[in-house]
Image (spheres, grey):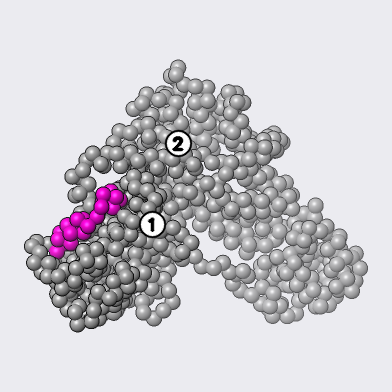
Amino acid sequence: MTTPNRSETFGRLLKAGIASIANCEGKTAPVVEDDLGTQIGVVGKSIQRYKAGALPPDPRTVQILADACVKRGMMGREWLEAFLHHARYPFADKLLDQLRPLGPIRPRPPRVYENLPAPTYSQFVMRPQAFAEIADGLGKRTAAVLIVGLGGNGKTSLAREVAAHCLRDDDETPRFDSVVWVSDKDRPGTTNLSTVLDEIARTLDYPGFTQFEHDEKRREVEQLLRRQKVLVVVDNFETISDGSLLTWLLNLPEPSKALITSREYRREWRSSWPVELRGMSESEAWDLVSERARVLKIDRLIGERTQLEPLLVATGGNPKALTMTLGLLKYERRPLQEVVDDLYAARGDLFDDLFTRAWALLDEAARRVLLVATFFPASASGEALSVTADVQSFAFDRAVERLADLSLLDVQQEDLRTPPRYVLHPLVRAFAGVKLVEQPGFEEGARERWVGWYMVLAQQVGWCWQDPRKLTLLDREQEVSFQVLLWCANHARATAVLELAANLSYYYHVRGLWDKKTVLEHLRAQAAHALNDINGEVIAYSFLIQVLARQDKLTELEPHLTRLRALADLPALTDESRCMVHETLAFYWMAQQAYGMARDAWHRSLPHTEQHEYHTTRRQLWLAVCLHRLGAIADAEGLLHDVLTRSTHLGRYRSIIGVKLRLAELALDNGHVDAADLLLEAVRAKAADYQDRENLALFQPLAARLHTLRGDLPAARASLAEAIDRFERLGMRRELAEARAELARLDASDAPIIGASEA
């Protein structure tokens, strides 16, 4: 029975706090006790009596102990509240708010999720009336705002500027948490509801959603749009024919909104908030012409503002036509009035005339660069353009300069530290596409150079497990790389598909872009089958099944597993391929929690891999996981230490992280809190350094267990919430369910806080 001057719970709480101080400062518990005793004015043995449950005789002692455990031991608010309650501290609320105020102690800066393209203009010419109408529409209950106008009128630039303002705290536009930009201009006609859902999921950093079936993906994305205020921008809607996308955008769930640009108005848009974007006013056009003339260094040729009126009439105030005309003015070396007279005299479409005249001003190098720019779906680096067009050094620089001056090529550059990238306006892309068709011989050679450049880039990355920083080489090029892979698959380039897939696979796995990885492995399997490459087909199906197994898609993987088993019986299989089959079966059994069968499959995957030490360590790591699940703790721990030694020797960072995660789990099972803490901190730092999303997710539930053992339940809940967020983003369903169940158990638990071991 507890006496009035004793509290066992107080003792356990103090014990946990002192152990946490010792761990944070790298000291032993007795040293910390002596230090606290000196502060209080008592001997260290008095602190030990408090740890045994004796209550301090005065509030000052309680305050000193609480202050030390919070500031030096990082104990949380819930621990402090319980500590002060059981210490019978008289001013608990005041000290609680002083030491652990409500809200996060170290708030993380809010991350703004957006995928806005870099601007192609150095200075945006404000269109005040249209801008205000759009902002007004975004503030209404209407789900969608439509910007409609002729091609070249500046719809894209205006939409981008409005979206950028919506991410700021200003009074001009409503504030949105995130912006998702989707454009149909790069691959007209390919945008549909599914691709828009995918882009929203990726931009909001939920790539795992892209692997869901359509209805489930739509449901999950709509939940995201309800939880935060997202502005979904769909550019160039006139080339989109998916009626379900139109219906969905017009009924977007609140508080999110849609902003759409289109050259044409449809009857279905009647429920939207339409904003018609006409040609520029005189003042707007003068601002644009003045800025553009300064960039082109032809200020002296423009003359007085009164001379602008004929140009405005001839171009209809169309910004694209204005900038192209200024480029013609520079390179045709004729007076402005003559250029304007030619525009008046032109027959047919204004842009047909402008493009024809601009094309005539291009030399062979500039024409080649413009034609190959159509290969790139979004934007192109200078190096990729140069190699693909077979135009190098000074000739390339001169070609790009002329194309930019004539507004045939737009330049994107985020800042002076990043190299420029080049994009095509939809009108220019259509014109260049027609010209490309007229030169099939050129396209064939250019496509070979295009594919070759990305194959070399992918080779530089490859299976870079010893140097994962190489993955950054693909961050800006992964979208084009994926399109190159698709192009090769669609044009029966099976050998190129195999090589590209082999060198891109690791990137998509580590970055968590598993939807693209599954497509990649599908294409690799088809290419290997076309080449009668049985071993290549085994590799492709193995990786495909493993990804699906990790996402708990057992029904979806069954047909692939049937094919893999059929391949396993063929005599042409190498020993390593047979081991790969057993490895895949092991993952399959683990997904079903049949750890005994998985253990046997892992054993069968090992005998022939001694000459492949990389594969040996990976398989032994998963074998150890199975042994742990089966209760063979000593065998699992011994194997993990062996794998850690070999992985360190090989420089396999992901294997090292995986081993330390499992060793930390074993340490937590045994109550070795300090050892687990050291292991987990090493994991967190290394996984964050390499942007290893999967292992960063797996780290969080173990961190929650560590916080729970230390009595810091708020921190444990925060870690579980982070785990749930990461598992949900990656589509790791089994781990997500486990984390949710653990958080629910923690919230419902009334059990006393467990003290940390002093060992």
Residue 202: x percent and y percent? 41, 55
- Label 2: which secondary element: helix
Q: Is residue 752 left or right of residue 33?
A: left
Residue at 29% across / 36% down in the picture? 491
Q: Which residues are magenta?
A: 350-369
Camera-side residue: 691 or 643?
Answer: 691
Number of the label disc, if any, that sits on residue 283? none
Q: Which residue is mark 2?
A: 502
Residue 670: x percent and y percent? 72, 46
Magenta segment includes 490: no
Number of the label disc, if any, that sits on residue 421? 1
Earlier sequence position, callout 1 versus callout 2: 1
Q: Is residue 689 above or below residue 143?
A: above
Residue 339: x percent and y percent? 16, 68
Q: Exactly how many numbered labels are in the figure?
A: 2
Residue at 81% across / 78% down in the picture? 60
Residue 479 in sight in this render = no
Amino acid type of the residue that numbered disc 2 sits on in the rendered structure: Ala
Residue at 38% across / 63% down in the picture? 118
Amino acid type of the residue that numbered disc 1 sits on in the rendered structure: Arg
Residue at 68% across / 78% down in the picture? 98
Residue 305: x percent and y percent? 23, 81
